[in-house]
Image: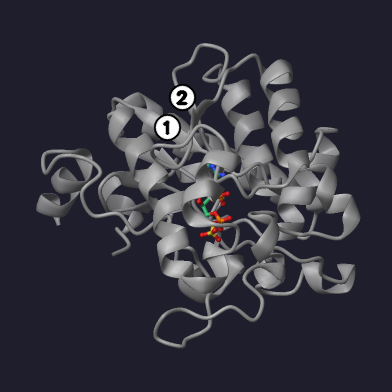
Amino acid sequence: MAVPLQLSFTLPESRRHHCFCPHLTSKTSRLQHLEDQALSALSHAVDNYGNVVFPCALITGDVVILDLLARLGHLESGRVPVIFIDTFHLFPETHSFLKSLETKYKFKARVFKPAGFETKKDYSAKHGSDLFITDVDEYDRICKVEPFQRSLKESGTDVMLNGRRRDHGAERAHLEVFEAGKPLKCNPLAYWEFRDCWDYVEANKLEYHPLHDQGFPSIGDEQSTVPVPKEKWFEYGGERSGRFQNMTNADGSAKTECGIHVMSDATSEKGPAAELASAR
Ligand SMILES: Nc1ncnc2c1ncn2[C@@H]1O[C@H](COP(=O)(O)OS(=O)(=O)O)[C@@H](OP(=O)(O)O)[C@H]1O
């Protein structure tokens, strides 16, 4: 359940009005406001909680968050570790992009793989090469959800950062900057739009995932990611429109998520999420 912002995090007075900021017609002022908000959220998380981690899929919004964390000094210092799930089904470009970012920002990601396997060959020997077709829920559990939960548990995670935004649509339409749960989630870009992320990347001349130039607005596993015509990228929900196309959940509903964020027991009952819940 979303936590009202004021319970856990208060924006400075000067920054109150920029969550939805249509009145800010200048691209530069809009970006400056959004940037300030995201930096405030990240600083709030780091200054008030113990273990803050960033599970990173290396898509455009994630690159923005990495850059903001680097500006705050939290990447090189290791204060905010970057978590990377190698699902064994990622594009090769994703692995090389990670290496490039590690060099640029001077961090080393904590890499987690499906339990019990070192390589895709080991994994395929047991599960075959098409588990994601024959049993997508089991595929998600083995390759994404379990390694993700393990990564949070082993990192003793109090707060998890991520790049989910309202304009992703579907389940994310009402996202807040801080979101109760175990662990607490911090979504510093919740009110950003996809265009804002690209404006930030362009303004700061950041390197971005090479597959964006091949027509992919969002990038995950190879089998659940397709290119999207550029004119659709910046429509509401456009970024994720190339993910999970024609895939369904076990109940027959359209698939929009892999369940990576559905976590129940990654941390103890006494974490910050429990504190927030009891404060409500
Ligand atoms: N490979 C990998 N490594 C580490 N963390 C990852 C990975 N894939 C997904 N994530 C995390 O899950 C968030 C949602 O990503 P996706 O939307 O791409 O996932 S999915 O659609 O549910 O498959 C994603 O949020 P973002 O920060 O918006 O990318 C991350 O928090």
Image coords of residue 68 (percent x, y): 61, 31
Image coords of residue 277 (percent x, y): 16, 53
Where residue 263 sits, quadrant-wise, is: bottom left
Per the image, label 1 sits on a secondary structure element best described as strand
Image coords of residue 156 (percent x, y): 27, 29
Q: Which mark is residue 53?
A: 1
Q: Quadrant of the C terminus?
A: bottom left
Badge 2 amino acid:
Val
Badge 1 amino acid:
Val
For marks 2 and 1, the one nearer the N-term is 1
Task: Tell whether 193 sits left or right of 13.
Answer: right
Residue with the mark numbered 2? 80
Density class for disc 1 (Cα within 10 Å; few <14, some 14-19, many ≥20) is many
Looking at the image, which residue is at 66% across and 30% down?
67
Density class for disc 2 (Cα within 10 Å; few <14, some 14-19, many ≥20) is many
Where residue 62 sits, quadrant-wise, is: top right
Task: Tell whether 3 sits left or right of 98.
Answer: left
In the rendered structure, are the residues bearing label 2 and label 1 in contact, judged by CB atoms less than 8 Å apart?
Answer: yes
Residue 259 visible, this angle: no
